[in-house]
Image (tube, rainbow, N blue to C red):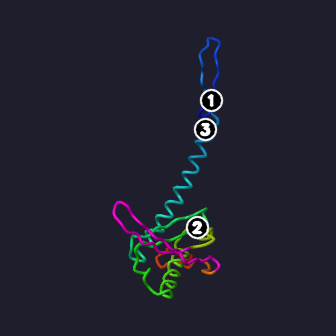
Amino acid sequence: MGAGGSEVRRLASGKVNARPHMLSRRALLSLLAAAAALGCADLKDMVSLQQGLAREFHTSAINVSLNNSAYLTVVFSNSPVADWSEGEQSAFARRVAEYVRDHYAHYDQLQSIQVGFASVKGVGITVSSTRIPYRFTPSELGPPRQPKNAIVPKAAS
């Protein structure tokens, strides 16, 4: 085997012939295409959630991340909420987690939702400090509730 998954053969003439393994390349491309399709779907859901959170909480400085398809984290950057009392922050964080519960398409796959705050300062070189003190599990939050703007199918007459 040569580099890059090619079969290298020396011909009788002394020339070297490199022939790619088409089956393994096709399999690899198929796997990459499937992973990209799944990744794009996840990315679309994450972008949709981030945009919804931005509308609901009136800020675009929100970072949403997903780890292992089960641990979702929402971080508000330079938010005035970070200066609120612990009780007010806790209530706010719960509202954020409930929003995720009611609007994230893959809520049923989550093991936890974490909510935190980041302080980001600087131009060119930035310094950030992040704390993520609030964690909620789906068992604490319960099943999703019907969002206000959801389309409800009409009952048959």
Q: Is residue 38 above or below residue 74?
A: above
Query: Which residue position is annotated with label 3?
Result: 26
Q: Quadrant of the C terminus?
A: bottom right
Does the magenta run of residues contain 115? yes
In this rendering, the label closer to the viewer, 2 or 1? 1
Nearest to N terminus: mark 2 or mark 1:
1
Residue at 52 percent across and 65 percent down: it is 65
Q: Quadrant of the N terminus?
A: top right
Q: Secondary structure at mark 1?
A: loop
Residue at 41 percent across and 66 percent down: it is 127
| Rendered image quadrant of residue 156 | bottom right
Residue at 42 percent across and 72 percent down: it is 119
Nearest to N terminus: mark 3 or mark 2:
3
Q: Secondary structure at mark 3?
A: helix
Looking at numbered disc 3 in the image, what kind of residue is underneath it? Answer: Arg
Nearest to N terminus: mark 1 or mark 3:
1
Q: Is residue 4 above or below residue 85?
A: above
In this rendering, the label closer to the viewer, 1 or 3? 1
Q: Secondary structure at mark 2?
A: loop
In three-dimensional space, the C-alpha distance between marks 3 and 2, rounded to whole angstroms, equals 31 Å
Side (left or right) of 103 relative to 78: right
Residue 106 is labelled as 2
Say few, some or many: other residues with alpha carbon within 10 Å of mark 1 (under 14 / 14 to 19 / 20 or more).
few
Looking at numbered disc 1 in the image, what kind of residue is underneath it? Answer: Gly
Q: Which residues are magenta?
A: 114-139
In three-dimensional space, the C-alpha distance between marks 2 and 1, rounded to whole angstroms, equals 43 Å
Can see residue 26?
yes
